[in-house]
Each structure stands twice: as C-alpha cells, then as structure tokens.
Image: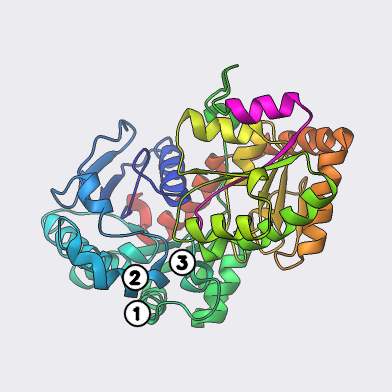
C-alpha cells in the first residue's frame, strides 16, 4: 500500500480514509505494509507502517500542501526557503526512488496506491517487478482545481497512470465519471468503492464543549451553522459566505463557524468583512481531536458547499456527532447519504433558504438528525473492504 499520509499526521480526509480502509482490510486475513514518505509513530498495530525516507513529519510538511496541486507552481518558487529545500514535486520524486529501492528484495501480491502523489512509485514497481497495481482515486485534478484547468503536470501523470493501471478504484460514481471524462479511461476498468463510516469507531463527546463563546451565544438564542474542511477553491466557501449574508439579514441570531485552513483563509476573512457579517462568522483555523469533534457537535446544521467533491466524509462525521447536513449536489457522499439536504453549489439563494429553514425549525432539524443517524447504521468500512478484496483476488490470483 502506497500512501501519502495517515492519522494523526493527516491534513485531510485522504489519511482518514486510508486508515479506516486498511483497518477493515486487516480483519480479512491479509498482510499490509503501508509506505508513507516520513518517519512518525502512528500508533497503528493492525498493519506495518514503513517510512520511505528519514525525514520527520514537520520537515515533510514544509514541502507544501499535498492536496492543492494547482497551487504547486507558486510553491515551487518559494520552496527553497523551507528547511529541506524540497518542493512537493521533489518529494514525489524522492518517494518514488525510495520505494523502488526498499522493495527490491521483497515480494508482494498487489500494489495498491492512493492518489497521484504515489502513482509514480506504483508505475515504477509495475515496470521493475511486474506486480499488478491498483490505483485508488480519492480526487482528480479537476476536482482539486475546481475546474478543468488544473496543474498540467499532475493531469498528465494521472492520465498516464490510470491508463497503465491494472484496475482503478473511484470513491464515488461522481469520481468515476470524472476519470472517464477527463482521461478517457474505460468505464469497465473503474470500480466504485465508496468511503464509509463505522459508528462504533466514533470517539465519544464529553459534556464540556471547547467552543465556550459559541455555547454562550446559543444560550442567548443563537443558532449555529458549521463547515469543516480545507479552505480551498474546491470547497466552495465563498458561496457559503454569500448565502450566510442572506441568512443573517433575516435571522441575525445565526453564527457561522468555519473550521479549517488553506490558501483562502485570509481571502474568506476579508470577504466576510466586506459582506458586513464579520461578527457572525468565526474562523477557527485547522483543528483535530477534541476541538474538531466539538465543532461538529456545537452546530445545528453542517454545510459542505463543495464545487466538486469526490466523496466528502465530513457530513457522515457530522451526523455521527448529532448534527444534520446540507451538501452540494456535486458531492459523491450524496450517493450513499439520502437523509440530508442537497443544493447546487452555485445556487446561493436556495442554499440560504435551506439553511434558514433549519435555523427556524427544530422539527426539521430533529427529523433530519434522527433519519440520517439511522442511515449511518447501515454503512460499514467492512463492506468497502470486501469489494477491494475481490479486486485483489482477481489480479493477484490464489495467493491472496
């Protein structure tokens, strides 16, 4: 297994999805060696986690944001200021060389690689060892860039890799269509394996919420809308702020809590000020652990307004902590989650209308929460693991 991150050293959902999937696979009589680019103690005992290089996490992260590949051109110009002198493209190259070297004397039945950052390494192993490679697509470049005009180097790598793969896994039908439309990969080569959630693995809340100010404002009759995710073009936060202005105009006792970091952080703060809704919009920056969980729990409604979301696991996490969700119709998670509100990301008026409806109706909020939580009971990473095991068997033969 080739991956770029694992919790607790993840900057987004990619690491979480890899962790949960491998945990489910480990229960199916399979041995996994997961190779990451950095050294760290992940506290994982259900698989072997191997560092491809000797760099620590802090040094590795200085090479840039692993998700926003359309940003790399700018990052290449400033990357020499970091401690390693490595850009993210340098890291990808170094990872490829390290992986190829460290597996020279090993034998595997299958190579399973996650997203473009690891695809070069997977192709290298296929060329050297003729091992079958399964490429797992959590997002394509057009998703990350919010349009078809992403980083051309990344798009070229994705195209070549996906055509050379023995099998491609997409996290949603949405992503499967993108792979086919962007790169012409045959539909019958792409298997959809949805991300999931296991309620038994959800860490419980305690009674003391971290967001004291928000809690106090709720006691004064305020309602709270929460959004958790990277502050990037793909996530559609400018549209949410425009909708927020319309909601606040009619319901001034509404707070919007924006949890996350990214290159749009200051742009969004400036936008909120320009819309004269600054006092009602709180930016928390990146959170994990208790403060991350408490952000979901403090909300009356969770909103994911993504322009294009391959899957989007945060609505499932929000529901697991008792907060119903509004998602864009351009989100893959909508294929498995029916009991939520949905809106086109560009429809600011309808987004504002649906948010306002929940803010003004406890009955609607409670019904959404109850029905969505019941729906989560039927989801499981184990089912996703079963689908992937069948792909392993198909490509690795009786050895698996």
Report, in whole angstroms, how far the alpha carbon at label 3 lies from the one at label 1. Answer: 20 Å
37 within the magenta span: no
Q: Which residues are magenta?
A: 212-231
Q: Report helix, strand or loop for mark 1.
A: helix
Can residue 37 be seen in this snapshot? Answer: no
Give above or below for 20 relative to 348. above
- Camera-side residue of 46 and 243: 243
Label located before the other in sequence (2 or 3): 2
Q: Report helix, strand or loop for mark 2.
A: helix
**Other residues around mark 1 within 10 Å, as few (<14) / some (14–19) / many (≥20):** some
**Other residues around mark 2 within 10 Å, as few (<14) / some (14–19) / many (≥20):** many
**Point 25% across, 59% down: residue:** 63
**Point 83% across, 47% down: residue:** 356
Labels 1 & 2 near each other (Cβ < 8 A)? yes
Report, in whole angstroms, how far the alpha carbon at label 1 lies from the one at label 2. Answer: 10 Å
Q: On the image, which quarter does residue 343 sit in?
A: bottom right
Determine which residue is flagged by label 1.
Answer: 153
Label located before the other in sequence (1 or 2): 2
Where does the image place residue 395, in percent across and percent down from the top left?
A: 39, 62
2 or 3: mark nearer the eye? 2
**Other residues around mark 3 within 10 Å, as few (<14) / some (14–19) / many (≥20):** many
Q: Looking at this rendering, what residue extends furthest in the top direction?
A: 207
Determine which residue is flagged by label 3.
Answer: 168
Determine which residue is flagged by label 2.
Answer: 72
**Point 62% across, 62% down: residue:** 238
- Camera-side residue of 389 and 93: 93
């Amino acid at each position: 297994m080739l991956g770029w991150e694992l919790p607790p050293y993840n900057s987004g959902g990619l690491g979480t999805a890899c962790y949960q999937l491998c945990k489910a696979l480990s229960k199916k009589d399979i041995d996994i060696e997961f190779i990451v680019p950095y050294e760290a103690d992940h506290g994982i005992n259900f698989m072997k986690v191997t560092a491809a290089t000797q760099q620590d996490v802090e040094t590795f992260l200085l090479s840039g944001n692993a998700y926003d590949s359309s940003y790399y051109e700018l990052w290449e110009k400033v990357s020499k200021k970091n401690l390693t002198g490595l850009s993210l493209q340098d890291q990808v190259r170094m990872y490829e060389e390290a992986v190829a070297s460290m597996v020279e004397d090993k034998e595997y039945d299958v190579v399973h690689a996650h997203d473009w950052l690891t695809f070069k390494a997977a192709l290298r192993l296929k060329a050297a060892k003729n091992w079958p490679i399964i490429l797992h697509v959590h997002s394509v470049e057009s998703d990350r860039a919010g349009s078809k005009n992403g980083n051309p180097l990344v798009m070229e790598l994705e195209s070549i890799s996906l055509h050379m793969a023995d099998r491609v896994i997409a996290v949603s039908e949405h992503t499967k269509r993108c792979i086919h439309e962007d790169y012409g990969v045959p539909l019958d080569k792409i298997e959809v394996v949805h991300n999931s959630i296991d309620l038994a693995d959800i860490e419980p809340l305690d009674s003391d919420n971290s967001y004291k100010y928000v809690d106090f404002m709720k006691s004064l009759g305020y309602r709270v809308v929460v959004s958790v995710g990277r502050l990037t073009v793909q996530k559609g936060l400018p549209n949410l702020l425009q909708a927020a202005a319309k909601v606040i105009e009619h319901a001034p006792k509404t707070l919007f809590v924006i949890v996350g970091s990214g290159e749009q952080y200051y742009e969004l703060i400036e936008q909120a000020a320009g819309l004269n809704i600054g006092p009602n919009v709180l930016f928390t920056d990146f959170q994990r652990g208790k403060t991350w969980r408490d952000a979901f729990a403090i909300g009356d409604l969770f909103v994911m307004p993504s322009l294009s979301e391959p899957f989007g696991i945060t609505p499932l996490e929000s529901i697991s902590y008792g907060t119903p969700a509004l998602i864009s119709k351009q989100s893959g998670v909508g294929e498995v989650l029916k009991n939520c509100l949905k809106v086109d990301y560009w429809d600011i008026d309808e987004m504002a209308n649906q948010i306002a409806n929940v803010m003004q109706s406890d009955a609607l909020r409670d019904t959404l929460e109850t029905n969505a939580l019941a729906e989560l009971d039927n989801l499981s990473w184990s089912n996703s693991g079963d689908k992937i095991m069948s792909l392993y068997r198909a490509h690795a033969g009786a050895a698996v």
